[in-house]
Amino acid sequence: MTTKKSSLSRRTFMAGTAGAMSLPLFVPKSVLGNAENAAANDKITLGFIGVGKMAYGSHMPHFLKMPEVKVLAVCDVDTNRREAAQKRVNDAYGNKDCDAYNDYGDLLARDDIDAVVIATPDHWHALVIRDAVKAGKDIYAEKPLTNNLAEAKIVMDTVKNSEIIFQTGSQQRASENFRHACELIQNGYLGKISRVEVGVGGPPSPDKLPGEEMEPGLDWERWLGPAPMREYSSVLSPRGVHNHFPSWRNFQPYGGGGMTDWGAHHFDIAQWGLGMDESGPVEIVPPEDPKRGNGLKYIYDNGVELLHGGKSGVTFFGSEGELFVNRGKLSSTPEEIVKIKLKDGDVHLYKAPGGSHGGHRQDWINSVKSRKQPNCPIEIGARSVAVCHLGNIAYRHAEELGGKSLKWDPQEWKFVGNEAANKWQDYPYERREGYELAKV
């Protein structure tokens, strides 16, 4: 694996001469490295790391249709998924040029790949993001951004100290209904906000799954990565191409349950609506009965309460009414609120091209070319997933807290007056040798 930063040739920030000013902000390395093939290769070159349900079934078909993009390589620890993704790329382009890897380090080491799409299980996100930054690749990374609170801070700092264009896969920000809901709230059309309810699933369960015999073709040790060694489970990693989202997300230490799975989407919208993209809650209050998996409360420094509970989606409660938003749904009481058109002088939030998935991906590609921040850059992704992890910490340690709340400093990224809680930011186990995480 290369640890050398990509040269600035692919990220040319031209200034100073008339000739330089006429060049595009983004020049693919394939163009600069092979002038005779420049016309054929004037595209953003992509690699896919993790080609399960989300990448193979959703991301890949969209990127393969983009005329400004060329997919060069795929990587997965499952032979069947890897070969299926390779075939999909080759069939789309009518060639046999796509390479397939088991080790993502081999993909990142290629100088002819400009950017990567990361769609591994959650417990791998932070490591792959860190290594992709080392390799100088622009990044689209699936939500939830990381698998614990400490990782979120590390990758946020790592990306912010680089020149990487980073998009978190929080595609709801590209949907008209979510954006309009947040614009109405930020412009005061719901009045003073007192409470928000986010209806998503609860924290993850301990991994007590039985071991199974495994057929050849899966690098199980590498699938586990930083997690403790255990026997193979088809619940965690069903073999080959499958049309469902595997249940690893429901078990520690591979995912954060519904709190991070859907929570990464809906807590993100709550943060957006409240104007907290650069901050977060300052207090987390565990529920009286943590076994219920809901009822936890967050408090922001302006007094707004955010409750984990209520109907699926996000409900904002203001002095002038209520507003509910979910995928394909937007309603209010009174009804007139959601029909309001923004006026000149109102806050207009970032509008991604198109809608939802397609628009969110295109927004990233546009940003790779322009070198401007996309819809959901690293800090937004990190702070939204931090809300999820703070909740999981409060649920997991409710008994130790004995009914006391946790005080959180979102700028210093630490619990205040509770050093034991600061140790809860990371995993409760040692990462296996070779899978340690540190800043770039």
Image (cartoon, rainbow, N blue to C red):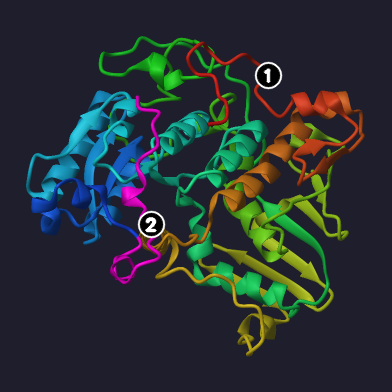
Residue furthest to the front in view is 17
Answer above or below: position of 9 versus 270: above
**x and y percentages locating residue 215 in the rendered image:** 28, 14
- Could you tell me the amino acid type at mark 1? Pro
**Residue 19 is one of the magenta-drawn residues:** yes
**Residue 125 is one of the magenta-drawn residues:** no
**x and y percentages locating residue 349 in the rendered image:** 59, 72
| Image quadrant in which you'd find residue 246 | top left
Residue behind mark 1: 428
Whether residue 247 is visible to the viewer of this picture, yes or no, is no
Residue behind mark 2: 368
| Helix, strand or loop for disc 2 | helix
| Image quadrant in which you'd find residue 23 | bottom left
**The residue stretch that appears in magenta:** 1-25
Ranked by sequence position, the earlier of labels 2 and 1 is: 2
| Helix, strand or loop for disc 1 | loop
Front residue (pair 42, 265)? 42
Q: In this view, does 380 lie to the left or right of 360?
A: right
**x and y percentages locating residue 276 in the rendered image:** 71, 59
Residue at 83% in and 38% down? 286
Residue at 26% in and 18% down? 217
- Could you tell me the amino acid type at mark 2? Val
Quadrant in which the N terminus appears: top left
Front residue (pair 425, 253)? 425
Label of residue 90 in the image: none
Whether residue 124 is visible to the viewer of this picture, yes or no, is yes
